[in-house]
Image (spheres, coloured by chain):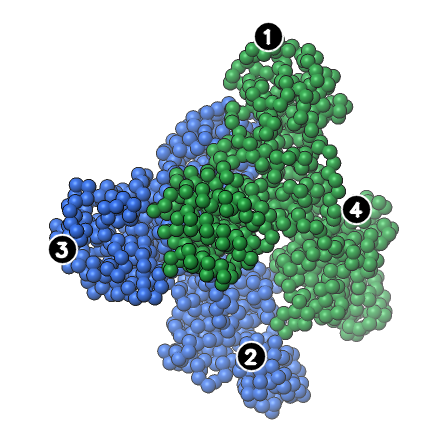
Chain colours: A green, B blue
Amino acid sequence: MNSVGPLPPDPLRDFFFPRGIVVIGVSRDPTRLGYGLARNVVRCSPAPVHLVHPEGGEWQGRTLHRAVSEVPRPVDLALLLLPAAKVADALRESAQAGVRAAIVESGGFREAGEAGARLEAELAAVARECGVRLIGPNCIGVVDTHLPLDTTFLPPRDDRAGTIAFVSHSGATCSAMLERALLEGWGFSRVISLGNQADVGEAEALLSLAHDPHTQAIALYLEGIQDGERFLAAARGVAQVKPIVALKVGRSAEGQRAARSHTGALASSDRAVEAAFAHCGILRAHTVEEMIVLARGLAHLKPSSGPRVAILTNAGGPGVMAADLLGEKGLELAQISAGTRARLAERLPLAAARGNPVDMLASAGAAEHAECARLLLEEAATDALIVTIVPPPMHDVVAVAEALSPILRSAVKPAAVCIMGGASAAKARQRLREAGVMECGYPSEAVLAISAAWRRTAIQSPRGESLAARSSTVGGPAREKLAPLSTGKPEAIAAFELAQAIGLDCPAWQFAADEAQAADAAANVGWPVALKAVAQRVAHKSEAGGVALGLVNEGEVREAYRRMRLEVEAYAGKGAWQGALVQAMAPAGQEVIVGAVRDAQFGPLLMFGSGGKEVEGMGDVAFALAPVTLAEAEAMLWRTWAGRRLGGVRGARAANREAVLDALAAIEGLMLTHPGLLEFEVNPLIVTAHEAWAVDVRGRIEEGSGHR
Amino acid sequence: MNSVGPLPPDPLRDFFFPRGIVVIGVSRDPTRLGYGLARNVVRCSPAPVHLVHPEGGEWQGRTLHRAVSEVPRPVDLALLLLPAAKVADALRESAQAGVRAAIVESGGFREAGEAGARLEAELAAVARECGVRLIGPNCIGVVDTHLPLDTTFLPPRDDRAGTIAFVSHSGATCSAMLERALLEGWGFSRVISLGNQADVGEAEALLSLAHDPHTQAIALYLEGIQDGERFLAAARGVAQVKPIVALKVGRSAEGQRAARSHTGALASSDRAVEAAFAHCGILRAHTVEEMIVLARGLAHLKPSSGPRVAILTNAGGPGVMAADLLGEKGLELAQISAGTRARLAERLPLAAARGNPVDMLASAGAAEHAECARLLLEEAATDALIVTIVPPPMHDVVAVAEALSPILRSAVKPAAVCIMGGASAAKARQRLREAGVMECGYPSEAVLAISAAWRRTAIQSPRGESLAARSSTVGGPAREKLAPLSTGKPEAIAAFELAQAIGLDCPAWQFAADEAQAADAAANVGWPVALKAVAQRVAHKSEAGGVALGLVNEGEVREAYRRMRLEVEAYAGKGAWQGALVQAMAPAGQEVIVGAVRDAQFGPLLMFGSGGKEVEGMGDVAFALAPVTLAEAEAMLWRTWAGRRLGGVRGARAANREAVLDALAAIEGLMLTHPGLLEFEVNPLIVTAHEAWAVDVRGRIEEGSGHR
């Protein structure tokens, strides 16, 4: 993401710019999907459409070819709506006729069980073998409202040409969105129903949309992600040129993952998705309606150069509602200058509120709306404008909308209008929409849209210095260092060796296999010491009585060793005991956790937060997907109380933020260069004014990957 | 709230059931509000309407009386729309004519500045003096769709009679909501625009609505609360019989309050509102659209007897969207029994998902929808049903809606239908609405509505045992005990005396005015000891070097005393030092905070959370408005990590939850019986397995209230 190179060529070019289209699976029965498909594509296609039916004959005056081989060439795109068992053969025949892209809309594949999954695998193999790109199966096709092209079997619609592209794992949601847009008077540029993704997935859809000149913003509905790495690469690049908003569902189906570390236990797949979206610059929507508002905002609003919002209203209520919601969306109320306030005063009655929100009162008509909007957009202290309107009893709200439109359209700052009401409000909103102004029905929607215009600016700004740039151990230690984690050496020992290898400061330590070794080790590392059990089947040492702190002489060490062994064996069984780690006591300081876990989809996920035994319970943690920039790492710290505390709070000295960032950088480097390492965590990292000590460390390596 | 007695009589009876209505301020000019007002009330009134105009004559064939004194009696309600300066006189004349209730719709009062505020005070005085109840000024009147009665000046509407009452501080929002309901096809029972509330406020509106047989749910839009005590009393009672949802704005305008304790600093007025709503059983909406969905859900859904929701869908996407949102609204996916799954299987294709969500696939028609909905409602393991539908290509979605309606209407469990789509979806939704079924356009709305049906059950259940019932010191100590907090005695000392008076265990302590006294005191309280500065102008002792812990002998105590005095004097000035508190060290345990702050509107607000120096930063706190039930106090604990930890976590023994509840009960009792006490806080309360020690205590008493 550091710099976005030239985009790869459009992988879906043949789907949207075919020289000819063949429909295989046409039906003569108007109640069948095969009829709807033929009807729609004949009606909406930028290229000649050829219909295939094994019986031949005619369909609405057009020839029905008996086979795809009889279709006049060139034919680049095939639309298939046949019983699942027949699709692979039809695809092969299509390829022989020159087809390079196919949309399979039939169901009965993976979604229908094992037999279907086998048919899907076969279909994918045929596509690969014949060099045909495939959308589907089990999808409703694609739509381009500008070409126009409609490859769906849905009831006929007159789609409005728009600037939002929608890519969806759910065909029904595509259909609902197309209808919703028609009802509400906005429009899509393209809709891509991905279905089972036997071949084409989200990544190709995104790359293709980057090339579409009509698409200004991209909305994604995701039920899973096919290939995390490809998705990240595509989304990172595309988000720099076209803003992306995504609704990702499936949280309710999420299982618990096995984890050895706190980081692993806390890093749910939903947190990984959250971090991945942040990493790529994808805005996350939590509901469909949020997705629509964000996408409309991104498609229609100019980018905002800051978070300062002016609110103009003709009624107190909606203005306050908007003001209340700014903060939680990362926006703030602009401080209107005295000059602008004076100019507003000239145009408004005495009782009007000239602060922010500017309440013009219900008496304000079209001229007041236009004039005040212009003043607020010209005010240097505002970055964006929200206008909230309730249709006033004495004025025509449509006239108000018409007066506002040219001002808002021509402004360089983003402006959204919310008109709360009924039929007259709907009519006024329609005028605004037709004039290209972002409008909505509730203050919360206007705030959400403006927040998108501001967040987009940050996303599309050049990325800063990487965190790795500050690490002296970039690339981490040689791979051999990982071996101990999967060999006979106790994990605790191996983890400490690894921590030291990547440059973390660990209090002096020695492994002791018996009581006498422990006493010697204590003398070597220096008093006072801590004793920590090294044992198998003990996930949390303190639960098993496996930690003794502040031992000040040999007697205490010996006694602690004996007692600890008994307790640990009682907890984990006789064979579990391996020995103890004797460690110099670290100085007092702030206890934090720094760790990383390798997400199966998205790769290393870094975590920072309040450390100690209670990490999961406190939940004071933040995640980011590696590699992070320095700014992102610092933002991670700020999102947690632990990170804010590093600056020093009441009576406590400032701790060493730099050392924490160094530790994060070292762990990031280790994870990025050692794919077999699944988890690595320092908890606590004790941070003092000048140092940071890795007091406890754990790691987990992929089974059988010790020698990768 | 422990038991709801009979409701007081309807305070707004004369507004809704007048024997005659007089309109003062009629206009002949159709562009004036005075025209609209006359038009609307003549059109919609359950009683004879009389019009007054100083020039006399006729208005649309009706007599214009020259003065209210000429109007035929009885006339109970006056509608006034005159210049502000003329309203008080007109009100007096109306009262002389027998009027007992008046709605003043004119502006130009408090909202317009000082002169207006004086006019408003005069108007209120006249109303009181004449025994007239007053709604307004600066409002748009009231509407009852069943009588019908329309006292607004809004453009003419044909309101649909409904079951939701709306009470609002914003007249424009009333107007927008009335229009929105018309557009969307639902309806209000009553709308009450309160305006400036010179007399009638939210409390009376709520009480009146409790009497209205057509109102099934109440929505409130609040910009402030007129009288916290009256509001609480009214809302508590009314919420038991009619569910209430409220949108409270004004968070953005909230200032910082002066506070001496952590509790005070954290208890924002928004948190107080949150606690007050929870206390009364008011559901809080965060946006208008949430308010509408919650109110519609409460008005149309049967109460739910549990949180277990079945989801029935004809498309994967919307079903998963709904499932994903259940958790954050306190709901869960029901576990459908094997028997029901088998019966579903009989009616569905093989590829259908019979888990939960039950995905019938797009092929499902009206009969499948009805049958599966019936099975899921009959399933013992479900408490509620959500049906999500995307209009299927092969079926008429209106027919689906018609088939579902009788099943959902007659069920004893609540059921909400979400139809995502365009025109056909809108038509199907209308059918459901007409049949009295809760419907919406997005899965999130269905989840929100069902969550309201479940929360209402908890709200309207009998309240359990009060927390106070467990306190041995109910009522708190005699008032004299508070005196020290406002007299010359150092606050720290007085606060400890108070803590002991209400039965909290404090480690043994003595006040020491000099080094020698400190040494003696230490010997008396027992080693080891803590030394804590008693000084003026020191808000947080540790910041000023005013805390020394674990002193083990006389030398250490003397040395600590000398050093502390120097540091505190350097921090707070020479005269600040008063002495030191010598305190036996408490045993180790979990540090929590228990406190209370008196909210100016709502009274004592209790707080519990993670204690120590970092209370504000960690923000691990929960609030509840006193008096609380035992269940509410326990819920407060559960909302915090500190409270969940009391049960014992990894390696730590369970702490004494009972002692924490006792401390909360004692502090609640103290606050309830001593109105002059503004803040009282124990931080930390150190909780061990069997005890709880109040290690530091602070209090603040109202200036000049020491002897109350």
Q: Circles 1 and 2: CB distance less than 8 Å?
A: no
Q: Distance between the residues labelled 4 and 2?
A: 54 Å
Residue located at (74% from left, 50% from top): A627
Instruction: Read off the residue under disc 2.
Output: B538
Asked if both marks, 4 and 2, belong to the same chain, the answer given is no
What label does residue B69 carry, if any? 3
**Mark 4, secondary structure of its residue:** loop
Residue located at (69% from left, 55% from top): A632
Q: Specify the farthest residue to the bottom.
A: B516
Asked if both marks, 3 and 2, belong to the same chain, the answer given is yes
Chain hosting mark 1: A
Residue located at (42% from left, 48% from top): A367
Asked if both marks, 1 and 3, belong to the same chain, the answer given is no
Q: Circles 4 and 2: CB distance less than 8 Å?
A: no
Q: In this view, does A254 lie above or below B255?
A: above
**Mark 1, secondary structure of its residue:** loop
| Residue B688 sits in quarter | bottom right
Q: How far apart are marks 4 and 3 (CA)?
A: 92 Å
Chain hosting mark 4: A
The answer to whether residue A408 is visible is: yes
Q: Check disc 4 and give the amino acid type.
A: Pro
Q: Circles 4 and 1: CB distance less than 8 Å?
A: no
Q: Distance between the residues labelled 4 and 1?
A: 60 Å
Q: Distance between the residues labelled 3 and 2?
A: 67 Å
- Front-most of residues A104 and A528: A104
Crowding at dot 3, Cα within 10 Å, few <14 / some 14-19 / many 20+, comes out as: some
What label does residue A675 carry, if any? 4
Chain hosting mark 2: B
